[in-house]
Amino acid sequence: MAFGILLHAVIGLLPVGGLLTALVVLDGYKLVTMRVLLLVAGAGVAVAVVAYFVNGALLTATGLEFTAYSRYVGPLVEEAGKALIVVALLRMHRIGFLVDGAILGFAVGTGFAIVENVWYQVLVPDAGIATWIVRGFGTALMHGGTTAIFAMMAVTMLERAPEAKLAGLVPGFAVAVLLHAGFNHLLGWPRLSTLVVLGVLPPLIWLVFQRSDRAVADWLGHGFDADAGLIESIGSGRFPDSHAGRYLAALRERFQGEVVADLLCYLRVHTELALRAKGILMMRENGFEVAVDSDMKAQFAELDYLAKSIGRTGLLALHPLIARDHRAMWQLNRLAGETAAAPASAAVPPRAP
């Protein structure tokens, strides 16, 4: 009996766990740390527990039969819960590319699937191996896949229309709900639903990884050159004649001289950290592990001090010189997450109103 339960658990969870592991291994830039991955999967577990009680209450309140509820209401509830975790990650600038969006979205679904399959084992302890094959290769992968697709579409919309915030989440959420509902419509044909999931998810995620790898490489290349050029300009006598130098000179009419000097220092430290963040990603992509040193911690401390010194108005004045897109915010958060002494105010300066 105990062996049978263990076998069912392995069959039910191995596919989704194996695919999540494969995604992490394929991530050559190591965009997602193990700590974040485990925390996100844990959040998926919490969502599954909450969804269980919400579904129970709504099933009673609506008076729908279980089959109808699972087709039309359940997918909305469950995908909304999983999507909230992805939205929180986006707002905290923990997702920068399609790759880490896919990994973290799939991790949320993995946590959800773990709870669902464990509970199914409690409800139907006598289910055969065929049932667990369907649950492992079908249901569990579906939960991971729909959330990964939502995360990837959200990142894509954020890149195309950064100002579209909430509206940009709607297409991905709609697709996730429709795929989930479509899967539940095929529950009467378990083999077909499993084959559909296996035929769609792995190729889709592979294509996304191929595309995103190129996007990461392009972003790193162009961004590294731009940051390096700015640092070189600040350290040379050509800075006053540059666009950034002329802009800071114009700010002397609005700020005192010492504040303008702090603005220049903030720009330099911020750009140096952005450059180091890109350099670390490049090193890791080539197989070199780079540890955060005390100098980097000191730079974050200096950035925090300068942010307090120049104030919110000064930070807003720097926005034309400091990239504010989600990837620029992500890279400093990624670096700050590896730097124990990194204050949140340094990693994420306030947004422009």
Image: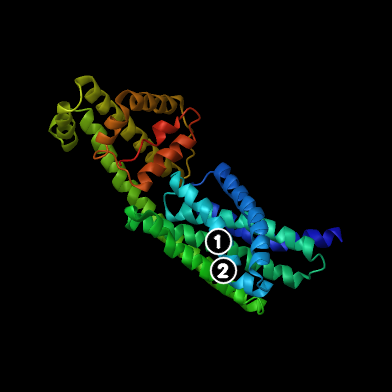
Marks 1 and 2: CB-CB under 8 Å?
yes
The percent position of residue 13, horizontal first and vertical second, equals 68, 59
Q: For residue 98, which quarter of the picture?
A: bottom left
Distance from disc 1 to disc 2, alpha carbons, whole Å, reads 8 Å
Of all residues, the one furthest to the top in this rendering is 258
Pick the front one: 315 or 102: 315
The percent position of residue 247, horizontal first and vertical second, equals 17, 34
The percent position of residue 148, horizontal first and vertical second, equals 51, 59
Q: Residues within 10 Å of mark 2 (few under 14, many from 20)?
A: many
- Helix, strand or loop under label 1: helix
Q: Label 2 sits on what residue type?
A: His
- Residue 309 appears left or right of 182: left
When the figure is inspected, residue 77 is found, relative to residue 284, above or below; the finding is below
Per the image, the residue denoted by label 2 is 180
Query: In which quadrant is the N terminus drawn?
Result: bottom right
Per the image, the residue denoted by label 1 is 79
- Residue 168 appears left or right of 264: right
Note whether residue 3 is visible: yes
Residue drawn at the location 61% of the way across and 66% of the way down? 74
The percent position of residue 36, horizontal first and vertical second, equals 55, 44
- Helix, strand or loop under label 2: helix
Residue drawn at the location 72% of the way across and 67% of the way down? 132
When the figure is inspected, residue 34 is found, relative to residue 84, above or below; the finding is above
Q: Label 1 sits on what residue type?
A: Glu
